[in-house]
Image (cartoon, coloured by chain):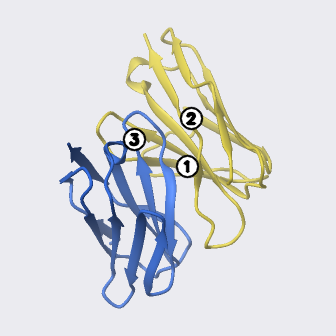
Amino acid sequence: GAVVSQHPSWVICKSGTSVKIECRSLDFQATTMFWYRQFPKQSLMLMATSNEGSKATYEQGVEKDKFLINHASLTLSTLTVTSAHPEDSSFYICSATGQGGSQPQHFGDGTRLSIL
Amino acid sequence: GQNIDQPTEMTATEGAIVQINCTYQTSGFNGLFWYQQHAGEAPTFLSYNVLDGLEEKGRFSSFLSRSKGYSYLLLKELQMKDSASYLCAVKDSNYQLIWGAGTKLIIKP
Protein backbone atom coordinates (compact mmCIF):
# COMPACT_ATOMS: atom_id res chain seq x y z
CA GLY A 1 0.00 0.00 0.00
CA ALA A 2 0.91 3.66 -0.21
CA VAL A 3 3.53 4.76 2.30
CA VAL A 4 3.98 8.21 3.76
CA SER A 5 7.02 8.89 5.90
CA GLN A 6 7.02 11.72 8.41
CA HIS A 7 9.86 12.79 10.61
CA PRO A 8 10.89 13.55 13.18
CA SER A 9 8.41 11.53 15.20
CA TRP A 10 9.14 13.41 18.41
CA VAL A 11 10.58 16.86 19.05
CA ILE A 12 11.24 18.59 22.35
CA CYS A 13 12.67 22.08 22.14
CA LYS A 14 12.85 25.44 23.84
CA SER A 15 10.39 28.25 23.32
CA GLY A 16 11.40 30.50 20.44
CA THR A 17 12.93 27.71 18.37
CA SER A 18 11.77 26.96 14.84
CA VAL A 19 10.97 23.35 14.06
CA LYS A 20 10.81 21.73 10.63
CA ILE A 21 8.75 18.61 9.98
CA GLU A 22 9.14 16.61 6.76
CA CYS A 23 6.54 14.54 4.99
CA ARG A 24 7.46 12.24 2.12
CA SER A 25 5.41 9.98 -0.10
CA LEU A 26 7.67 6.99 -0.66
CA ASP A 27 5.98 5.01 -3.40
CA PHE A 28 3.58 7.36 -5.15
CA GLN A 29 3.41 10.90 -6.44
CA ALA A 30 1.51 13.08 -4.01
CA THR A 31 -0.26 15.77 -5.96
CA THR A 32 -1.75 17.10 -2.75
CA MET A 33 -0.48 17.02 0.81
CA PHE A 34 -2.32 18.00 3.95
CA TRP A 35 -1.18 19.09 7.36
CA TYR A 36 -3.28 18.38 10.43
CA ARG A 37 -3.03 19.15 14.08
CA GLN A 38 -4.59 17.11 16.85
CA PHE A 39 -4.83 17.88 20.54
CA PRO A 40 -5.32 15.02 23.03
CA LYS A 41 -8.75 13.40 22.82
CA GLN A 42 -9.84 15.81 20.10
CA SER A 43 -10.53 15.29 16.43
CA LEU A 44 -8.20 16.05 13.55
CA MET A 45 -8.01 19.70 12.62
CA LEU A 46 -6.94 20.51 9.07
CA MET A 47 -4.37 23.30 9.05
CA ALA A 48 -3.53 23.61 5.38
CA THR A 49 -3.62 21.95 1.98
CA SER A 50 -0.70 22.14 -0.38
CA ASN A 51 -0.35 21.27 -4.03
CA GLU A 52 3.05 20.70 -5.55
CA GLY A 53 4.59 23.89 -6.87
CA SER A 54 1.95 26.26 -5.55
CA LYS A 55 1.25 28.13 -2.33
CA ALA A 56 -0.52 26.32 0.44
CA THR A 57 -4.15 27.05 1.24
CA TYR A 58 -4.56 27.66 4.96
CA GLU A 59 -7.71 27.03 6.98
CA GLN A 60 -9.34 29.89 8.78
CA GLY A 61 -7.54 30.78 11.97
CA VAL A 62 -4.23 29.21 10.99
CA GLU A 63 -1.41 31.75 10.76
CA LYS A 64 0.50 31.23 7.54
CA ASP A 65 3.50 33.20 8.81
CA LYS A 66 3.65 30.96 11.85
CA PHE A 67 3.23 27.67 10.02
CA LEU A 68 5.28 27.77 6.84
CA ILE A 69 4.50 25.08 4.31
CA ASN A 70 6.62 24.17 1.33
CA HIS A 71 5.66 21.55 -1.26
CA ALA A 72 8.58 21.71 -3.66
CA SER A 73 8.23 18.29 -5.24
CA LEU A 74 5.65 15.56 -5.80
CA THR A 75 7.12 13.55 -2.94
CA LEU A 76 8.05 16.10 -0.27
CA SER A 77 6.27 18.70 1.80
CA THR A 78 7.63 20.45 4.87
CA LEU A 79 5.95 22.29 7.72
CA THR A 80 8.03 24.75 9.71
CA VAL A 81 6.66 25.97 13.01
CA THR A 82 8.40 29.30 13.45
CA SER A 83 9.28 30.73 16.85
CA ALA A 84 7.38 27.94 18.58
CA HIS A 85 5.71 28.55 21.94
CA PRO A 86 4.25 26.10 24.48
CA GLU A 87 0.76 26.55 23.03
CA ASP A 88 2.07 25.13 19.75
CA SER A 89 2.71 21.80 21.48
CA SER A 90 0.56 19.26 19.71
CA PHE A 91 0.50 16.19 17.49
CA TYR A 92 1.12 17.22 13.88
CA ILE A 93 0.17 14.77 11.14
CA CYS A 94 0.69 14.99 7.41
CA SER A 95 -1.17 13.09 4.75
CA ALA A 96 -0.78 12.73 1.02
CA THR A 97 -3.02 11.76 -1.83
CA GLY A 98 -2.45 10.94 -5.47
CA GLN A 99 -4.47 12.11 -8.43
CA GLY A 100 -8.11 11.11 -8.68
CA GLY A 101 -11.13 11.71 -6.48
CA SER A 102 -11.23 8.14 -5.23
CA GLN A 103 -7.72 8.28 -3.81
CA PRO A 104 -7.67 8.15 0.00
CA GLN A 105 -5.38 10.26 2.10
CA HIS A 106 -2.47 8.24 3.41
CA PHE A 107 -1.09 9.46 6.68
CA GLY A 108 2.40 9.75 8.06
CA ASP A 109 3.01 8.51 11.59
CA GLY A 110 2.76 12.03 13.03
CA THR A 111 5.14 14.28 14.93
CA ARG A 112 4.68 14.92 18.61
CA LEU A 113 5.92 18.45 19.29
CA SER A 114 6.61 19.60 22.84
CA ILE A 115 7.74 23.17 23.43
CA LEU A 116 9.22 23.88 26.85
CA GLY B 1 -23.16 24.04 6.25
CA GLN B 2 -21.41 20.73 5.97
CA ASN B 3 -21.90 18.22 8.70
CA ILE B 4 -20.90 14.67 9.55
CA ASP B 5 -22.43 12.92 12.53
CA GLN B 6 -21.25 9.77 14.23
CA PRO B 7 -21.65 8.54 17.80
CA THR B 8 -19.02 9.76 20.23
CA GLU B 9 -18.39 6.45 21.90
CA MET B 10 -19.49 2.81 21.66
CA THR B 11 -18.73 -0.26 23.72
CA ALA B 12 -18.75 -3.85 22.48
CA THR B 13 -17.60 -7.27 23.61
CA GLU B 14 -14.67 -9.24 22.23
CA GLY B 15 -15.86 -11.67 19.54
CA ALA B 16 -19.08 -9.76 18.89
CA ILE B 17 -20.18 -7.55 15.98
CA VAL B 18 -20.51 -3.77 16.10
CA GLN B 19 -21.93 -1.27 13.64
CA ILE B 20 -20.75 2.34 13.65
CA ASN B 21 -23.08 4.72 11.85
CA CYS B 22 -22.26 7.90 10.02
CA THR B 23 -24.69 10.41 8.54
CA TYR B 24 -23.59 13.30 6.40
CA GLN B 25 -24.86 16.51 4.86
CA THR B 26 -22.37 17.93 2.42
CA SER B 27 -22.34 20.13 -0.65
CA GLY B 28 -21.95 17.36 -3.19
CA PHE B 29 -20.53 13.90 -2.74
CA ASN B 30 -17.42 12.31 -4.17
CA GLY B 31 -16.95 9.35 -1.91
CA LEU B 32 -16.91 8.36 1.74
CA PHE B 33 -13.90 7.06 3.65
CA TRP B 34 -13.48 5.23 6.93
CA TYR B 35 -10.27 5.48 8.92
CA GLN B 36 -9.06 3.83 12.11
CA GLN B 37 -7.00 5.78 14.62
CA HIS B 38 -5.40 4.21 17.67
CA ALA B 39 -4.66 6.53 20.57
CA GLY B 40 -1.49 8.51 19.99
CA GLU B 41 -1.14 7.32 16.41
CA ALA B 42 -2.02 8.67 12.98
CA PRO B 43 -5.15 7.45 11.15
CA THR B 44 -4.97 4.49 8.80
CA PHE B 45 -7.22 4.03 5.79
CA LEU B 46 -9.88 1.30 6.09
CA SER B 47 -12.39 1.65 3.27
CA TYR B 48 -13.83 3.75 0.49
CA ASN B 49 -17.43 3.83 -0.83
CA VAL B 50 -18.66 5.90 -3.72
CA LEU B 51 -21.55 3.74 -4.98
CA ASP B 52 -24.46 2.44 -2.94
CA GLY B 53 -23.98 -0.92 -1.35
CA LEU B 54 -21.68 -2.96 0.79
CA GLU B 55 -17.91 -3.22 0.47
CA GLU B 56 -16.37 -6.11 2.38
CA LYS B 57 -12.75 -6.35 3.43
CA GLY B 58 -12.05 -9.20 5.78
CA ARG B 59 -13.60 -8.57 9.18
CA PHE B 60 -14.55 -5.03 8.19
CA SER B 61 -17.39 -4.00 5.87
CA SER B 62 -18.64 -0.56 4.91
CA PHE B 63 -22.07 0.32 3.58
CA LEU B 64 -23.27 3.42 1.76
CA SER B 65 -26.68 4.85 0.90
CA ARG B 66 -26.26 8.11 -0.98
CA SER B 67 -29.97 8.90 -1.05
CA LYS B 68 -30.08 8.73 2.75
CA GLY B 69 -26.70 10.37 3.34
CA TYR B 70 -25.78 7.39 5.45
CA SER B 71 -22.95 4.94 5.90
CA TYR B 72 -21.95 2.37 8.44
CA LEU B 73 -18.80 0.48 9.28
CA LEU B 74 -19.37 -3.09 10.43
CA LEU B 75 -16.71 -4.85 12.46
CA LYS B 76 -17.07 -8.60 12.98
CA GLU B 77 -15.32 -11.00 15.37
CA LEU B 78 -14.10 -8.10 17.44
CA GLN B 79 -10.61 -8.28 18.86
CA MET B 80 -9.11 -6.22 21.66
CA LYS B 81 -6.82 -4.53 19.13
CA ASP B 82 -9.93 -3.07 17.43
CA SER B 83 -10.23 -0.63 20.33
CA ALA B 84 -9.64 2.67 18.55
CA SER B 85 -11.40 5.70 17.15
CA TYR B 86 -13.14 5.28 13.81
CA LEU B 87 -13.36 8.33 11.61
CA CYS B 88 -15.89 8.89 8.86
CA ALA B 89 -14.93 11.39 6.14
CA VAL B 90 -16.72 12.59 3.00
CA LYS B 91 -15.31 14.25 -0.11
CA ASP B 92 -17.55 17.11 -1.18
CA SER B 93 -18.10 18.58 -4.64
CA ASN B 94 -14.73 20.37 -4.44
CA TYR B 95 -13.02 17.12 -3.44
CA GLN B 96 -12.39 18.57 0.02
CA LEU B 97 -12.41 15.92 2.71
CA ILE B 98 -14.85 16.71 5.50
CA TRP B 99 -14.08 14.82 8.72
CA GLY B 100 -16.41 13.52 11.38
CA ALA B 101 -15.31 13.83 15.00
CA GLY B 102 -14.77 10.08 15.27
CA THR B 103 -16.32 7.27 17.28
CA LYS B 104 -14.29 5.85 20.12
CA LEU B 105 -14.83 2.10 20.22
CA ILE B 106 -14.12 0.32 23.49
CA ILE B 107 -13.81 -3.46 23.38
CA LYS B 108 -14.36 -5.37 26.60
CA PRO B 109 -13.23 -8.96 27.22
Against A86, is B64 above or below? Answer: below
Q: Quadrant of the N terminus of chain A?
A: bottom right
Q: Which chain does yellow denote in the image?
A: A
Q: Which amino acid does label 3 sit on?
A: His
Q: Is mark 1 on a helix, strand or loop?
A: strand
Looking at the image, is mark 1 or mark 3 nearer the viewer? Answer: 3
Mark number, residue B93: none
Which residue is label 1 attached to? A48
Q: Is mark 2 on a helix, strand or loop?
A: strand
Q: Which chain does blue denote in the image?
A: B
Q: Nearer the viewer, residue A28 or A44?
A: A28
Give the residue drawn at x 44%, y 87%. Answer: B52
Against B22, is B82 above or below? Answer: above
Residue B13 left/right relative to B60? left
Which residue is label 2 attached to? A67
Q: Which residue lies furthest to the bottom in this view?
A: B67
